Structure formats: C-alpha cells, structure tokens
Amino acid sequence: MGSNGYLPLFATRSARGLVLFRSYAASIFIGICFICFYRVSYCPVEGKTERWAWIGVFLAELWFSFYFFITAVVRWNPVFRYTFKDRLSSRYNEEALPGVDIFVCTADPRIEPPMMVINTVLSVMAYDYPSEKLSVYLSDDGGSDLTFYALLEAARFSQIWLPFCRNLKVEPRSPEAYFSYAAEPADDSVMAKEWLFVKKSYEDMKMRIETITEQGRIPVGISKLHKGFRDWDLVSSRHDHQAILQILIDGRDPNAMDVEGKPLPTLVYLAREKRPQHHHNFKAGALNALIRVSSSISNAPFILTVDCDMYSNNSETIKDVLCFFLDEEKGHEIGYVQYPQSFGNLTKNDIYGSSLRVVMEVELAGFDGNGGPCYIGTGCVHRREALCGMKYSKEFKVEWRATKNDRGIKESASVLEENCKALASCTYEETTQWGKEIGLKYGCPVEDVLTAISIQSRGWRSVYFIPERKAFLGVVPTTLLQSLVQHKRWADGDLQIFLSKHCPFVYGRERMPLMLQLSYCNYLLWAVNCLASLYYVTVPSFCLLKGIPLFPKISSSWPLPFLYVITVDCAYGLVEFVWCGGTVRGWLNEQRMWMFRRTTSYLFAFIDNILKLCGFSKTAFVITGKVADDHVYQRYEQEIMEFGTTSPMFTILATLALFNLFSFVGVIKKVALDEVHTKVFDLFGLQILLCFILVFLNLPIYQGLFFRNDNGKMPPSITYQSLTFAVFACTIAMY
C-alpha cells in the first residue's frame, strides 16, 4: 500500500536468475583478463606483418571486451512490471478516465497496402475502453486517395465491427488477423449468423478496396460519395500538395453511433502539406503535425503511436498503460510507456533474426532497471506534456477525475477541418521550436531514440511493459536485403546521435542515470562494431594462408581462456535465446545475421556517418517493404534465404564467404600434407576453428552462389565479382 493509503496500480519486480547472469559475466571478465595478459605478453617482436596483425587482433578483442561490458551493464538489473487493472476499474469509472489519442502512420500505399493500414486502424478503434474517449488519427504521408478511400470504408465497417468485438470479446481486433484463424460459433445459431454477416461484410469491403487499389485510381462514381475526394483535384503529386484533413467520424456528434447505439471513436484522416522546397522531416514531421492537429480536435492527455503494420493484439492495452500513468505514487513521474515489438509473420526459426527476441525480452527490461527504456517508434504511449517539451517537476500533478466527456458540438466538423489545416502546413514550424524542443526531434533517421533521450534528459521516467498477451503484432522483412537495409538505417541514426550534441553523456549527463547513459551505447555503437568484426572475419583467415599464427598453440594452456570465453558465451546466449521462446536453429540464424549486419549494414552506416561529418552526405529515410512477391514469400516461409537482386552488400557477403572458404580449404590441404599431421594444427588450431565457424555460418551464401536455380539465388554478376575479389585476396595472401 502506498504512503497515501492507496493500493498501487502496478508492481515492479527484479528479474530472476540475476545471480547466474552476474556469475557468468564475472567469469567472462576473468577470461578476458587472461586473454589480454596473453596478448600483451606474447606479442611478436620480430616480423612487421606478424606484429601489426597481432596488434590488430588485440585491438579487435579489446573492442569486443568493451562491448561485452556495455551489454553487461544493460542486463545487470532488469525489472519487470505488472499491472492491476481491477484496481484501476474500481478507482475510476468510465467518465473519470482520460482520453487517449492514437496516431497511426503510413507513407506509401505501394509498400504499405491500404488493407494493412485499415486493419491496424480498426484494431485500435475497437479497444476495450470507452469509445468516446478514443480519437484515432491516420497520418498518410503518401497523400493517397486510395488510402483515404480505404479509411472511409473502415469508418463505415466500424459501425458493425466494434459491437461485434464487444459482444464476442474478440481477440485480436484486427479483422484480417481474427478471421484468418477464428472458427464460426457452433453452439449459438444467432451468434453464428452475426459472425457470418460480419465476416462477409469484411470480405466485401476487402474486395472493394483491393480492386480499387489494383486499378490505382478512384472511380468517378465513388469519388462523388464524399466531399473529401475533391481535395485530390488540387494535388500535383504525393510530394507536392496542400494539407488534406477530413474528420470521418466526429466523436463530438451525438449521432456518431454504431449499430447498437454506442458512441464511436473520433476518426481523422490527415495528409500534411508537402512542397518540394520544404523539408518534411519524414515520420517525425508527420507525428508532430498530428500532435498539433489533435490538440485542436481532442487534445487527449495521452498519445499512442503505432506503425501502420503493427495491429493491436490486446484489447486491454490502454487499461494496462493507464495503470502506470494514473498510479497515485509514481504515475506523475512517467513520460511514456513502451511496449515490446512483436511480429506475426515470423517463421519458426526466424531466418533473418528479425524478432530481436533477447533485445525485446531482456535488454529493454534492463534499460527499465537502469532508468527507463528508449522509445522504439511504435507501440508507445506518451504523456502529451512530456512529448511537447515540458520538463519534469515533482510538483507536476493532474486530477483526472475533473475531466468529463462532452459530446456536444461547439463548431462544425468542416470549420474545425479548415482551422486545423494551418497546423499541418509545411511553413507552420518555421521560427518555432518544433522538432528541436517540442515534439519529436528532427535531423536523425532514428527520431524515436533521439526523442527518448530528450524526454529522459528533461527528468521524465519511462517504463517498459511486457503483457502476458502481446500488445501489438507487426510485419518483419521477408528478404535478406530488406533486413540489412533496415539495420543500416538504425545503425546510421544511432551512431549519428552518439557523434552529436545529443549523445547521452553530453545531453543527458545532468538528469539521466549513468547506467542508462551507458545502456544507450549498446545501440548507439552498433555501427562501430563493423571495424572489429570485419578484422576478425578477414585477417585471421588471411594469416592462415600466409602462415602467420595469431592465437596460442593448442599444446599450451593458453587456448583455455579463449575456448572458455567462446564456449560459455555461446552456451549462455543459446539458453537465453531458447528461454525467450526461440529455437536452437533460430539462435544459429541470429548469430549468422549479426555477422551479416556487422560486415554490411553497420559498415555502410559507419561510412555514411563519416561522409556526413565531412559534408558529403545527407540524412535519408528508407521505408521497409511490407509486401512481397508470392514466390518470394513462399521461399521466406520455407526459410530459404532470399538474394535475387544485386547489391553492394551481397558483393561483400559473398566475397567474405568465398575468401574464408578458400582459406579453410587451403589450410586443410596444409594439414593433410603435413608429415606429422599435428604440427600445423597445433600452430593454427584456433584460427582453423574460427575459419570453420565462419564457413559454417556462410552456408546459405554458398547455396545461393552455386547450388540454387530459383529466382532467389545470388545473381551471376555478384558471383563473378565475389569470385574475382576472393581469388585476388587469396593470391595476395599466398604471394
């Protein structure tokens, strides 16, 4: 019970097994100390090449040791949160509950199909929460009349979908996700009839939307049905148009009811103004426009941000999050509550390591224990004041019981639409603090992380909450290139933050705990990992061909610390991954993908940052594709790695894979020709082991290069280029 006599609305508990983790981390640290002692004590004195290769390996190992320390800091004290929704319900009746604004963002109907978008919209409209307290805003940065038409259809369908969800307690409340697995009720003929009617209504709506989306234009007959379509008569292109704002459901209107006479949530479509001569600041600019527009329409104290491909999977998400914000003891300290990112289209073994299981299940909980998780761009509920630049103060208190819903119309929806368009103009932010001190931060590909650092630097706490039922389910990339490009953008933005004035050690030094500042380095330094990783996957194999040993002899006792660190770290990582719901093969896939990312995505991110510092590059934002060709998706479901196109990233991966294969074959030949059969192995045992591991991890690359005939194989041009580069590197090593 709190000091004011109230039972808390949430509880915080430390993770179990901390003694095991800390013992593991301490033992790894001791092993690292032995390795460092060996490197310093046995550094070659003679031979310039040998000495520099040895020093390079030592520096790479020092970086891995430093990064292990950062990772240990993140995981040192993870905490988990538990909510008490029954206490919330007994303490707050429906009239006393605060309003919630929900922002859904989309940017391109070709990459993010309108049907996907409206399924997300319908899922958040149907939350188990008073509908009159919800306002849903769709930001369409593609400015597409196809998306507007789909949202108009969704507004009509919501009149039957929301009561259907209430009556059947539907989970999840995305129609596509629900009807894809739910069976018709067999024990209630009346309910079965309603179920079939709603399903047919959804399928009819889906067919209409997909047909018009395929046509690529709105038929004249349909465009006359709603005044909003007239706005597209003035649109030059998706990058050059006026602000388009339509209130499709006006929550203030007493007549905005579903088929059972219950209020509907407010539903607003916004395509902010865009002009070629004005920078639109990508997703951050879209969200800031929504913050301003919503402040004039609903002005709810809490804002949920959701990507268009992340539908709600838990109808009680809003109630869960309010257990944190409305807690009498600690609620006023909380600036935002972050949910994990979860995905609905993962394969069994997660071939591209897209789930980031350990990051979501362990590391972000560790962030919470160190001061609060970062904002990850979706599935996050913000306090409006914190998002709009307000600094935390102990005196900050809000009396929620004073709020009362008023469904009376003070001004018509059309007047409100016209008044709000100015807030979404491309010139509104000029000479203001928007994007600097107010709203989401500009100037970085990962505006979410930058915004989180800004909020936490103003003294607000953040909370990470993992509910029993996943709050949101999204879509992961279904090709290797999509995954690598996505990580390139993340790593690029993270390093950009670290090298800027917004680095946690500078920007947050006064109000962010040191442990939290160090925790951010786990992600902000992703790109820098490319240097040590590239060295470790090339130089030891190069030295194998050249006959330069970089590790201790197998016959000595010095291999033990190397083997211990490798074995224990892998064993702990495997157990942790399986504990988080993964498989053994999934863990192998994740190790492979971390190697691929470090040698391609992070390398290009690192180079981009260097070019930006030199003034040769500008920030860009790439939308990850959400749809794939049927054959591509079929290969994804079969867990066959997708290449199929040319990319510098594939050239690097194939070259490294072939170079390590040639090195491994070359050293095996040396072992076979060795008269003693043990001399070469004794001298190069650990290097051979490292080369073998690299060859094993690259097996899908070899398959794509030489053993596949489908369209997802490695393009011939990549094969020829990589063979040329790998043979050239081997020639240099041997001669």
Image (spheres, rainbow, N blue to C red):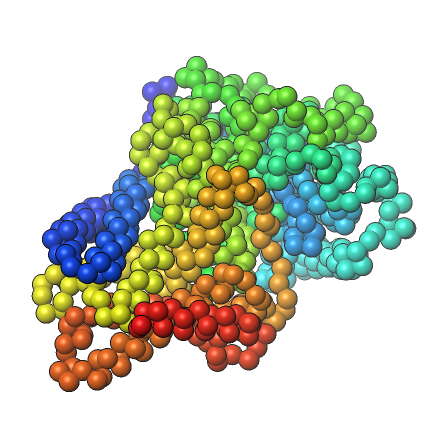
Quarter of the picture containing the N terminus is: top left
- Residue 708 is situated, as x and y percent measured from the top left of the image, at 51, 79
Left or right of 164 on screen, residue 150: right
Q: Nearer the viewer, residue 536 or 425?
A: 536
- Residue 19 is situated, as x and y percent measured from the top left of the image, at 20, 46
Please identify the quarter of the rendering in which residue 543 is found. bottom left
At x 57%, y 69%, the residue is 644
Left or right of 535 on screen, residue 681: left
Quarter of the picture containing the C terminus is: bottom left
* Residue 201 drawn above or below residue 327: below
* Residue 440 drawn above or below residue 27: above
Please identify the quarter of the rendering in which residue 373 is found. top left
Q: Nearer the viewer, residue 224 or 652?
A: 652
- Farthest left residue in view: 556
* Residue 544 drawn above or below residue 406: below
Left or right of 597 on screen, residue 186: right
- Residue 376 is situated, as x and y percent measured from the top left of the image, at 48, 42
At x 81%, y 29%, the residue is 414
Count the labels in the image.
Answer: 0
- Residue 10 is situated, as x and y percent measured from the top left of the image, at 40, 33
At x 72%, y 38%, the residue is 276
The answer to whether any part of residue 478 appears in the image is yes
At x 30%, y 77%, the residue is 666
The answer to whether any part of residue 84 appears in the image is no
Q: Nearer the viewer, residue 309 or 183?
A: 309
